[in-house]
Image (cartoon, rainbow, N blue to C red):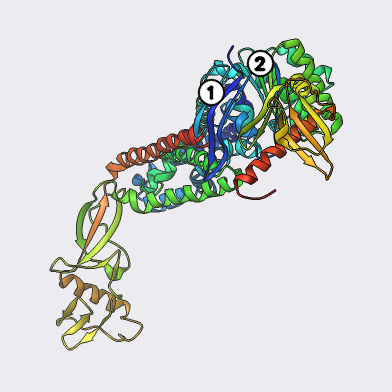
Amino acid sequence: MTAAVETTGLGKRYGSRWALSDCTLAIPTGRVVGLVGPNGAGKTTLLSSAVGLLSPTSGSITVLGAEPAATGRQMGRIGFVAQDTPLYSSLSVADHLRLGAHMNPGWDNDLAQGRLEQLDLDLGQSAGSLSGGQKAQVALTLAIAKHPELLILDEPAARLDPLARREFLQILMETVAEDNVSVVLSSHLVADLERVCDYLVVLVSSRVQVDGEIEKLLATHLRLTGPRRDLGTLPKSQRVIEASHTDRQSTLLVRTEEPILDPALTVEHVGLEELVLAYMRQAREVRLAALGVQP
Amino acid sequence: MMWLTWRQSRTQILVAFGALAALAVIALLTGANLAHLYNTTIATCTAHNDCGTAQAAFLQNDTDLQTALGVLLIVVPGIVGVFWGAPLIARELETGTYRLAWTQSVTRTRWFAVKVGLVGLASVAVTGLLSLMVTWWSVPLDRVTMNPFGSFDERDVVPVAYAAFAFVLGVTMGVLIRRAVPAMAATAFAFAGARLAVFLWVRPNLNAPLHLTVPDTLLSGRVSTGALNPRDWITSTETINAAGRVIGENGLVGNGLSVGNGPHGVTIAGVGSCPNITLPPPTGLAGPSPAGHILAQKCLNQLGVRDLLNYQPAGRYWTFQWHELTIFIVLALLLVGICFWWVHRRLA
């Protein structure tokens, strides 16, 4: 099966600054993939490269097995909602639908119109007068109505208030369920991703820290609390992501496929947010260590 | 893509063509009147032997409109470049909408070609029609003024090339600067600069000028055009002495012409003296009297001072039009290439 997005050593440089460097990853199709990472991790650069807005300085990227944006046909296979969901402010909502119809051979006008009517959007209204939530909805409609195989969304909900964000994601979820489309969605809000995604990629400084099905990630990451102990005494099958110690007690976040048998340990499952934060902190410590800074 | 470009620019294009239509009505009415006046006064003036007065009177018709149309044709290409060219892509880059446009099922090449092609065509069409209109309107006036090079940039085909160049220059500035307003300012300056540079330094040298030597008329304050056709374009004059050495340019000699009575009659600094001529007083600071001017001029001519006229014959008018058209079209094509490359490589 071809990957939705696959990169090998992908790098993008602006002047002397690398926005993304040596990034190698594979994001599967048939899933709703959450791409999460701190600001500056390279999420936007990665997704912009995937839709052909940016061309890489080094390395390579394929989307659904082909070069991004090489042909109009390839562009028709991918729907994209850009950060801040830009629209032409002087054009009406109806004009945006016409734009979509004229620029996409696979355009489904009934779908687009139906969606916007469901949202109680006045089609005659100019896009400049829409609220942030409505704008995001129009942008999403444009991306969906071309019937893409893959939908890529770059922080579509970042600027929305919590209510609008929840609504937006709700509608996104319904669409995905109906259309059977693969989705890659970036965000730095783990709670949002948890609500809609079934697969997670944690990206920090161009590196994938962890990726996999969310259910499986949650099942295999455990917090262990017990008497203070040396990390070297843990079984090989347990990989420590994070450890903190008090005088008498240790708390560890470990990844393990096997059950914890040690009766001295209290075992707890962790939430997705905690898991992601642990990986981000780990990445930061590794980077600081590489720079010679003691944590 | 065609639809989007049309939707985005239809207001400005329709306004431009509307204004053009209104102007056409004015031009038709006044133009018909001018043609009629020409036929009744100028065409018959030789019979009445009063051509001087008739021509002067004829040129007084519609002077405001003459000026307005001339200025319009000079500024319209600039306006097209500043208001149509510069924001064309800059606005998309500035507001981020390029991310919407470039992720529909239309390649960037097509997007660029349609956008620049359609609005560019409108720019050229508007300017071309305006030039056609003004050229037609001015035919009777131009016949009287007999100076086709004087209104060179306001007639015939060159305005079209100016518009094409200005438009593409605007697009390029927009792509490079990525912000509409600064790009508009840069376009205005760059276009004015390019036009001025071509006007001052390129146009006079497009074709080697012809030369004609005529008796000097330095002191009369006017250049004698000798046997030249009044429609010819005199690009420069040189004053030369008997030995053929250039002693002055464009009606001026070195440090000005110092004339006075010397021991050997009238003496002209840097030129020589004429023992047989003496200036009547006063010959002080104010220079020779009007009668003295005539005598000094006589001396200059006696010393063999002549004027060399460098000129472009009127017959070359269309050669110049086509040459200047070519220059600006080639520049425009060059800029389109740069722009295309920049949009594909640098904005990615």
Q: Is residue B189 left or right of residue B328?
A: right
Q: Is residue A244 left or right of residue B326?
A: right
Compared to residue B329, the image places residue A176 above or below, namely: above
For the N terminus of chain B, give its image quadrant. top right
Horizontal and vertical percent position of residue B53: 41, 53
Query: Can you tell which quarter of the image residue B324 is in?
Result: top left
Horizontal and vertical percent position of residue B168: 48, 38
Name the residue located 22 percent from the left edge and 79 percent from the top edge.
B268
Horizontal and vertical percent position of residue B246: 20, 66
Q: Amino acid at mark 1?
A: Thr
Mark 1 → mark 2, Cα distance in angstroms: 15 Å
Residue indicated by mark 2: A146
Query: How many dots with numbers?
Result: 2
Q: Label 1 crowding class (10 Å Cα cut-off): few <14, some 14-19, many 20+?
A: many
Subunit that carries the residue with mark 1: B
Residue indicated by mark 1: B107
Residue closer to the observer: A127 or B318: A127
**Same chain check for tags 1 and 2:** no
Q: Label 2 crowding class (10 Å Cα cut-off): few <14, some 14-19, many 20+?
A: many
Residue closer to the observer: A276 or B285: A276
- Helix, strand or loop at disc 2? loop
